[in-house]
Image (spheres, rainbow, N blue to C red):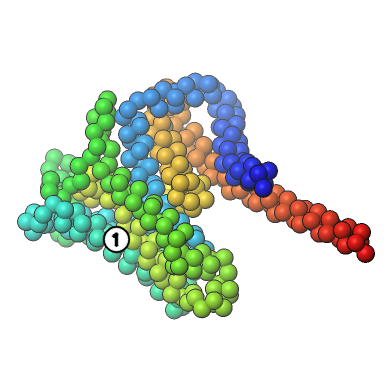
């Protein structure tokens, strides 16, 4: 039992560590081939890691990436690919920002204002994801296709609503257009860090709570068991009395609700308005982080921190003369390496289990022959 546990631990660490080592080797070869020193690159990234501002920005990025990853992972657990997290989060952020910046909200207590803003964001995200769920259970439309198309629709809908004649206003002294600024009562205070002018998002606590709830629901509740069982085998779930269509709808609604939270840390902790420069593509980063973390809450946390650091280390590389695009190459190689590494480890584990069963059967047969 002790040897088996040690092997399982080694197999669990082999895939992520092997993928990181392989990605480092590939990036080192690319750097050398382009005339850049891999040692100088590592030194620049190590120097950046020691700066409080870089650490704070990395944690803030990781907070957003983690929420996006959890939203994607909820669908992954049931073999659903919610590619529409990006559209869900942007539409939710824009509409909740318009509500939070409305004049009548100034008359409400601060806690209630923040709660309403977050609640509306979750409802909008869940509603937008619910459209894909409805198409799947009623017409059999693949959620991949429907969520990709809903991403495009959300983009144009946000552009339509983000207009001075509708839900937006022009920022004085610039050409930027955004929703009305959220006043102090609707903002979430950040956490100050010594040596950094940037504060840690106050809603980092929200990301931790979401991660805990995600783990608890999937690991300690009947719904989580049914969700994973449906993802593993729909026919077995149906035989157990589980409604597959119901699980599809619920999981997509939950995924969309968490997707609605993705924009909240920046909206309520930094920007205080939804404008044209709000970061796009967070949903797709969430897919990469979920894959890298294997849909596990702790794994996704580590992956989000790594992704956030790499994003913020790109600026340090640019200053030191190393092309910042090397970070994008590193991120892409890491994701591909992890997918391949986990598949190789899975095949090795299956083969090892088959050999162990074969040896056990052989010993049993030998004992039977001896007793005969």
Q: Position of residue 38 (x, y in %)?
A: 54, 24
Total marks placed: 1
User: Which one is nearer the viewer's eye here, 224 or 114?
Assistant: 224
Identify which residue, 64 or 229, lies in the foreground: 229
Q: Residue furthest left?
A: 107
Circle 1 residue: 122
**What residue is drawn where x is 9% and y is 57%?**
108
Q: Left or right: 127 with respect to 115?
A: right
Describe the element under mark 1 as helix, strand or loop: helix
State which quadrant residue 131 falls in: bottom left
Residue 312 occupies quadrant: top left
Residue 105 showing in the rendered view: yes
Tell me residue 40's x, y (percent). 49, 20
Residue 228 located left or right of residue 253: right
Residue 348 percent across, percent down from the top left? 70, 49
* Circle 1 residues within 10 Å: few <14, some 14–19, many ≥20: many
Inspect this view and state whether residue 318 appears. Answer: no
Percent coordinates x, y for residue 366 in the rendering:
88, 58
């Amino acid at each position: 039992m002790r040897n088996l546990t040690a092997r399982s631990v080694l197999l669990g660490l082999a895939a992520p560590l092997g993928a990181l080592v392989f990605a480092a080797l590939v990036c080192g070869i690319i750097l050398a081939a382009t005339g850049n020193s891999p040692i100088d690159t590592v030194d620049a990234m190590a120097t950046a890691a020691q700066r409080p501002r870089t650490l704070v920005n990395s944690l803030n990025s990781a907070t957003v990436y983690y929420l996006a990853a959890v939203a994607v992972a909820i669908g992954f657990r049931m073999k659903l690919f919610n590619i529409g997290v990006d559209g869900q989060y942007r539409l939710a952020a824009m509409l909740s920002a318009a509500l939070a910046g409305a004049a009548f909200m100034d008359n409400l207590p601060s806690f209630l204002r923040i709660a309403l803003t977050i609640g509306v964001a979750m409802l909008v995200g869940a509603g937008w994801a619910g459209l894909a769920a409805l198409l799947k259970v009623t017409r059999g439309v693949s959620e991949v296709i429907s969520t990709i198309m809903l991403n495009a629709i959300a983009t144009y809908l946000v552009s339509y609503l983000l207009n001075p004649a509708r839900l937006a206003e022009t920022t004085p002294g610039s050409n930027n257009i955004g929703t009305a600024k959220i006043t102090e009562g609707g903002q979430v205070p950040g956490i100050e860090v010594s040596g950094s002018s940037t504060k840690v998002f106050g809603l980092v606590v929200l990301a931790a709570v979401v991660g805990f709830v995600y783990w608890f629901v999937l690991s300690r509740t009947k719904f989580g068991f049914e969700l994973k069982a449906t993802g593993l085998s729909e026919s077995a779930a149906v035989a157990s009395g589980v409604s597959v269509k119901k699980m599809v709808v619920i999981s997509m609604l939950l995924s969309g609700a968490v997707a609605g939270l993705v924009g909240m840390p920046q909206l309520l902790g930094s920007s205080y308005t939804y404008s044209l420069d709000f970061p796009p593509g967070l949903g797709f980063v969430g897919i990469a982080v979920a894959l890298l973390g294997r849909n596990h809450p702790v794994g996704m946390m580590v992956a989000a921190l790594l992704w956030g650091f790499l994003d913020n280390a790109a600026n340090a590389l640019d200053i030191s003369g190393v092309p910042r695009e090397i970070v994008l190459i590193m991120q892409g190689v890491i994701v591909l390496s992890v997918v391949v590494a986990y598949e190789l480890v899975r095949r090795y584990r299956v083969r090892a289990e088959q050999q162990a069963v074969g040896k056990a059967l052989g010993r049993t047969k030998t004992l039977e022959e001896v007793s005969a």
